[in-house]
Image (spheres, grey):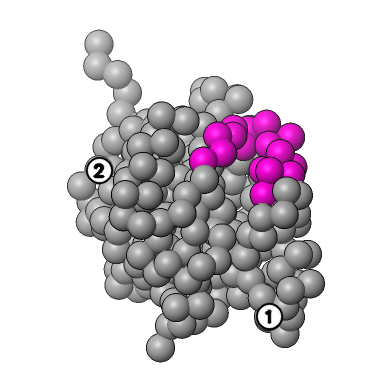
Amino acid sequence: MANTQDFNGRWALVTGASAGIGAALARELARHGAKLILTARRLDRLEALGAELTANGAEVRVLPADLNDPAAPQQLYDATEGAGLPVEILINNAGLGQFGAFSSSPLDQELSQVRVNCEAMVRLTRLFVPRMVERRRGWVLVLASTASYQPLPYFATYAATKAFDRFFALGLAAEVASLGVKVTALCPGPTESEFFDVSRASIFKGRGVQSAEEVARRGIGALARGQRVIIPYLAGRFTALLVRFLPVGLITFFVEKGARPKAPSA
């Protein structure tokens, strides 16, 4: 049974909390009594979510930050742990993707995926985990994806960053398990969020999309149990198992055919 009651009264830092899975994770943690530190780029949305959670009895602080900026993780640390506010739950949710041919996609968007999905996640985790180890108590959730289980043509950088996230979480989980810190990689598939629009992948909308609330509920439950990886839907678990037995070349061949962007009409 998940010990979600352990979250009661503890401070949780949720990145990318302004919408989608991040907002749903914040609501789920608040439902279990956690105190929330919400961070994302869009202050207006953070304040709206903060007001909603406060009205429902949660204690909330809002810290706008852009994790594309390498200085942002240290700023978040200084405003929390550095100011005497113990962050015992770190939710590394912030991330972005980019759909399209790598050879013609905006370079900065490709590099932003590496900075936010990988570099910022590592920086934040490296800042907060040592204090969790000192206290011999803490929880870290890393947002990976079912995209982490195979290379994805036209999502090449995104899938690679999510493979990094999942492997990082699994390796760290083994390191800190005996030190009282639980680490979980949450690997959702298509989820109700702004991801499709922001990543220019709206053609994939409606293909077995799962609600952000369900993803958050299953993810927080897995984190409480100390489960090291969670794929929150059956089809995703089946796919992750299946690709272990198929040649990578075969997988990428069919994905490339199915995902190839259509040429603009004349």
Residue 132: where, in percent of width, then height?
Answer: 71, 68
Count of marks, rendered view: 2
Label located before the other in sequence (2 or 1) = 1
Residue 224: where, in percent of width, then height?
Answer: 49, 77
Question: Is residue 73 within the magenta segment?
Answer: yes
Mark 1, secondary structure of its residue = loop
Is residue 228 shown left or right of residue 154?
Answer: right
Tag of residue 83: none
Mark 2, secondary structure of its residue = loop
Which quadrant, please, contains the C terminus? top left
With respect to residue 141, does 118 lie above or below?
above
Is residue 261 shown left or right of residue 97?
Answer: left
Which quadrant, please, contains the N terminus? bottom left
- Magenta region: which residues? 62-80
Tag of residue 180: 1
Tag of residue 205: 2
With respect to residue 140, does 107 lie above or below?
above
Viewer-closest of 263 and 190: 190
Q: Does the image show residue 125?
A: no
Label 1 near label 2: C-beta < 8 Å? Answer: no
The residue depicted at 51 percent of the width and 68 percent of the height is: 9
Give the amino acid at mark 2.
Answer: Lys
Question: Is residue 155 within the magenta segment?
Answer: no
The residue depicted at 42 percent of the width and 63 percent of the height is: 29
Gap between marks 2 and 1, in whole Å? Answer: 40 Å
Residue 162: where, in percent of width, then height?
Answer: 55, 53
Tell which residue pokes out farthest to the top in this image: 266
